[in-house]
Each structure stands twice: as structure tokens, then as C-alpha cells.
Image (cartoon, helix red, strand yellow):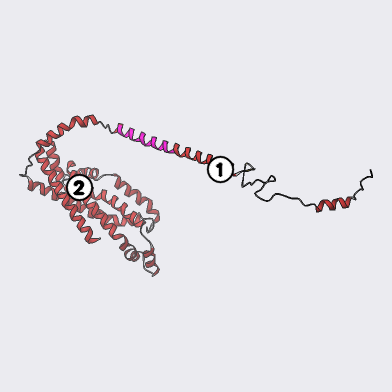
Amino acid sequence: MSPRPAVPKGARTAVRSTEVTHEPPPGRSEGGSHRSAKHGGYPVSPAAQAQLALQARQRGDIRGRLKLGLLCGGVLAFYAVSWWLAQVDPVKLVTGLPKLWFWLAQAWPPRFEELPLFLLRTAETVAMAAIGTTAATLLAIPMAVLASRNITPFPRLYYPARWFLNALRGIDSFVFALLFVAAVGLGPFAGVLGIALHTWGSAAKLFSDQIENAQMGPLDAVRTTGAGRYTALVYGLLPDVLPVLLSTALFWWEFNVRASTVLGVVGAGGIGQELKNSMDLLDFSRLFTIIAVILIVVTALDQFSAWLRKRLI
């Protein structure tokens, strides 16, 4: 057999440089199967991808169920502790209902001999609520401007103003009235001060929230004309928020009429004082008459407030 002819070194290099390397197209392996993703650096088939997605979905479902279970357990634990702290006892309610029916039977028929006195005390209650709510509304408007992030002229006072309003809201008018009874003595004036302070914080908080949620387009349009801050607020913002402010003020007047009926318990005047006297004397007939007067007056004021709201808003 004749020997194979030797290839020169330079020619061998040239042949190697002209060899074409055939690589599989993207997405297809050398064996011809498609590969659409890699997992851990290795190609993964579509079936394996579906299995991995299913496993991830199952893990997510397990975590979701675990979170839901923890949430439900926390809510149940909260209400269980609240039930224990409130000392809720349905057995006491069932055994006490016959006593309640006995006292209700003692309250009939109502007594109308003191009806003029009851009406006078009720008028005191309405007057306390009206003056206290009006004073609180007038004080709440400038505080609402300070406590509104978008229009406050002193941004550094935003949080102090909010904290001050939270302090007023956190103390009930009943507690304020109790404090002012010690300061100014017994009578409706202490009730007026208690209503005014609590409503001041609550109304200003609601006013500021409405102002922060208002559209700033009209206000900015007025400011572009060269108007000052006060003029822009009056003509650009006030027409937008005024209906809500009036509705909120009427709501607080209605609320304070109902709430001030118990201020007399601490000596702050109004129909609540007669209510407490009747309860102390166990005069249920007189107590029933007072409650009937309160219900009638509150219902009439609610109807009047609804009519006034439709006319003003």
C-alpha cells in the first residue's frame, strides 16, 4: 500500500480555517427537540416548564392560605379577648329581661304635669348644641387650613395642628363638660364649652380631609391671574368645598343635640339633668316622659336639618 501523501503544515491550517461548524438553530437542540427556557443553566422542556409553574402556583396558594389562616386566627383571638374583657354574659341578659319589663310597666302612664319644665330643659339642650357647634365651626375653618397639606401657609405647623386636633377629638364632650363644671360651675355654659372643644377638633379634621381631597385646578387657575392666597382660596377653593362643609356642620349640630342630652348627668344643664334626677329617684313614669320628649325633639330636628341641607346644598 502506497503511503498517504503528506500535507504541508500551511495547507493543513488553511483547510481547518475553511471548515464550517454547523450549530443547531436557537431553540432547537442537536437532537432536534425544542428548548424554550433554561433552569439552573440547563435547557428545560415545555412540560418541565409547566410543572415548575404549577409547583410555584401551589407554593403561592399555600402561602396565601397560611396568611388567610393567620389573619382569621388573629381576628378570632381579638374578638375572644374583647368578649372576655367586656364580660359579655348572655345569661345575665336573659335573667334580667323580666326586671326590665317590670320597670317598663311601672313607667306607664307618662306624667305631663312637668311638661313645661321638660320643654324648657330641652330648649337649653338645643341651645347648647347650637352655640357650641357654631363656635366650633368658626374655630375649625382656620385650623382646617393649617391642617391641610395642600394649602397650609405654614408647612411646619401641619403636624402640630393635626396633633392638636387629635387631642381635642380624643377627649369626649362629656369629659370636657365635667372639667368645665369644676371651672365655671354648674349650668349649660359648661356644656357649651365641652361641646365646642370636642366638635372643634372633630369638625376641623373632617374639613381638612375634604380640603386635601378637593381639586386644585380652580385654585391654581385663580393663582395664575395674580390673585393672592386669600382671594384664590375664596374664589378657587371655597365654592368646591362649601357644600361639604355646610353638610358636616349640620351633621355635628344634629349629633350634639343628641349627645348633649346626657351632659346634665355631670351638671352641665339641659334635659340630661332632669333625666338623671328621675333615674336617681327611680321615677320611671317621669323618666318615660322625658325620653318621649327627647325622641320627639330629636326627630323634628333631624327633619328640619334634612330640609335645610336640601335648601343650602
Q: Residue furthest front?
A: 1
Mark whose residue sits in front, 1 or 2? 1
Q: CA distance from mark 1 to mark 2?
A: 64 Å
- The mark nearer the N terminus, 1 or 2, is 1
Q: What amino acid is at disc 1?
A: Ala
Quarter holding the N terminus is: top right
Q: Which mark is residue 258?
A: 2
Quarter of the figure with residue 112: top left
Q: Which residues are magenta?
A: 66-83
Contact? badges 1 and 2 (CB < 8 Å): no
The answer to which of 269 and 156 lies nearer the viewer is: 269
Left-right relation of 115 to 165: left
Mark 2 burial class by Cα count in 10 Å: few <14, some 14-19, many 20+: some
Residue 7 on the magenta span: no
Image point 38% across, 61% down: which residue? 216
Q: What amino acid is at disc 2?
A: Arg
Quarter holding the C terminus is: bottom left
Mark 1 burial class by Cα count in 10 Å: few <14, some 14-19, many 20+: few
- Count every numbered label the image shows and give the total: 2
Left-right relation of 7 to 170: right
Relative to 171, say whether 228 is above or below: below
* Helix, strand or loop status at disc 1: helix
Image point 31% across, 60% down: which residue? 241
* Helix, strand or loop status at disc 2: helix
Q: Which residue is mark 1?
A: 50
Q: Residue furthest right?
A: 2
